[in-house]
Amino acid sequence: MLKIRKVLFSGKTQYQSVDIIESEIYGRSLILDGKTQSTERDEYIYHEALVSPAMLMHESPAEVFIAGGGEGATLREVLNHKSVINVRMVDLDEEIVELSKLYLPKHHMGAFEDPRLELHHVDARAYLQTDDARYDVVILDLVDPLEEGTAYQLYTKEFYEIVKNSLKPDGIMVTQSGSSDITNFRDCYVPIVHTIRTVFNWVDNYQVNISGFGMPWSFTIASQTPRDTNGIGLDKCNERINRNLRFYDYESHVHMFNIPKYVRDELAMEARINSDDNPIFMV
């Protein structure tokens, strides 16, 4: 629970409730529908973890698609990669982006002004279904699949098929896949990984601890082409990224991908497939 020093904004957009607060410990923080999305204190851990492995496992990611990520920090991390020519970002909620521009400058750091950005405010699934472009990397920085919302449609087998078809043959997808805390990792994280395994030839997953969430968080990465998760060294980070990262390097990378045995055991046994007709919600 964040201890609030000051409320900067509190209201509702067309799609969700929004609170942007100043926390005594975590600084400016974005809260959607009562759930902390990111904080100034540790957002770089989440966003570097989400973006860096997929971008560095690809030989030269030039065309990148981002679904969600309204506060602009995922975009910031993508644009730090020297190979990037174009980023197409689709976030349904335009008001979140505008509020983030105003109240969360340390998150986006001016990324919305970069000429490589093409920004759309429509449904990401509908957009990809009709999009003729093919991407090197697709990054899914989405809100959680809650029963009362529509985001669950961006975690189903049918959606991952759409994403696969939007990638180039050597393309990579990465998504946030929910809490990996021992109390609830079976709820969404494990079935999301299993669902993605039914779509892509190669799938791996990793986790980091996010203090502002009060729990570890998972990410799932996938491709039609097998990837070497140990093939990312410090030299590659230095050569391909425009600035020094605060969290991610080779040692952090290795640590992230070494998930606990109890998680690996559950992943091996999982049989649930998240589908449009039978969705799985985060509790």
Image (cartoon, rainbow, N blue to C red):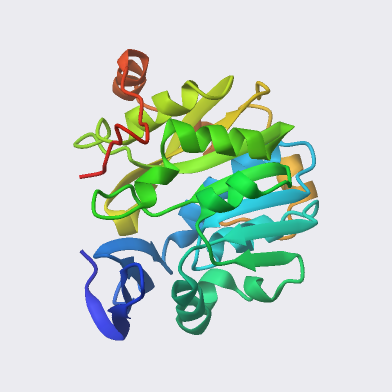
Q: Which of the pair 60/281 is nearer the observer?
A: 281
> Residue 126: x, y in percent?
53, 51
Taking the image as shown, residue 241 lies to the left or right of residue 16, namely right
Figure label count: 0
Taking the image as shown, residue 263 lies to the left or right of residue 75, namely left
Q: Residue at x 38, y 51 (%)?
A: 151
Q: Residue at x 48, y 22 (%)?
A: 197
Q: Is 209 located above or below residue 88 in the figure?
A: above
Q: Which of the pair 174/163 is nearer the observer?
A: 163
Q: Residue 16 falls in which quadrant of the image?
A: bottom left
Placement of the N terminus among the 4 image quadrants: bottom left
Q: Is 135 located above or below residue 7 in the figure?
A: above
Q: Which of the pair 169/43 is nearer the observer?
A: 169
Q: Which of the pair 127/94 is nearer the observer?
A: 127
Q: Residue 74 falls in which quadrant of the image?
A: bottom right
> Residue 92: x, y in percent?
48, 63
